[in-house]
Amino acid sequence: MKALAPKEKLATRAGLAQFLRFGLVGVANTATSYIVIRLLAEPLGVPAASAIGYAAGVVQSFVLNRFWTFSTTRPRKDGRLGGEAVRFIAVNLACGGLFTLVNSLAEPHIGLFAAALAGVAMVTPLGFILNRFIVFR
């Protein structure tokens, strides 16, 4: 049987299920970040609480995506957790930059909420593809 190309793998039920898990992880990360920020904002101030909350969400995202969304029984290509972590951080920085750019350019024309939705709509599929084929390959 012929192996499926990466594009074809995404068009399967398993690919859709993986994308949905990726989305659920994103919702969980957002909730975790928000809870940490709310708990720490008063004692530490909003900037410190935001940084810690964001970091907590990123760590949770890495763990859940590595062991649930993109789990596999085969060994990783580089065999090291560190390589995945570095790629994960790079992908998140790139996606965060794209989100910021889209949000900044769209906000004056369509408002903050719609701009944020546009940013999420662009970054989520891109983040999924980059995580699937680069980070957790």
Image: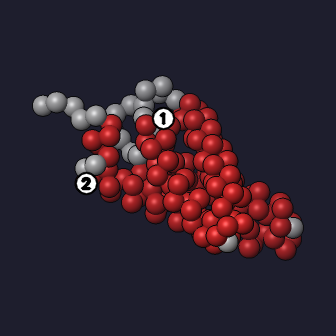
76 to 68, vertically: above or below: above
Image location of residue 28, percent across then percent down: 54, 65
What residue is pinned by disc 2? 13
Q: How many marks?
A: 2
Q: Residues within 10 Å of mark 2 (few under 14, many from 20)?
A: few
Residue flagged by tag 1: what amino acid is it?
Ile
48 to the left or right of 25: right
**What SS does tag 1 mark?**
helix
Disc 2 secondary structure class:
helix
Q: Which residue is mark 1?
A: 134
Relative side of 24 to 112, left or right: left
Position of residue 15 measured from the top left corner of the image (x, y, whole percent): 31, 50
Q: Write the residue at 72% across / 66% down.
A: 108
Residue at the extreme front: 109
Q: Is residue 25 left or right of residue 11?
A: right
Q: Quadrant of the N terminus?
A: top left
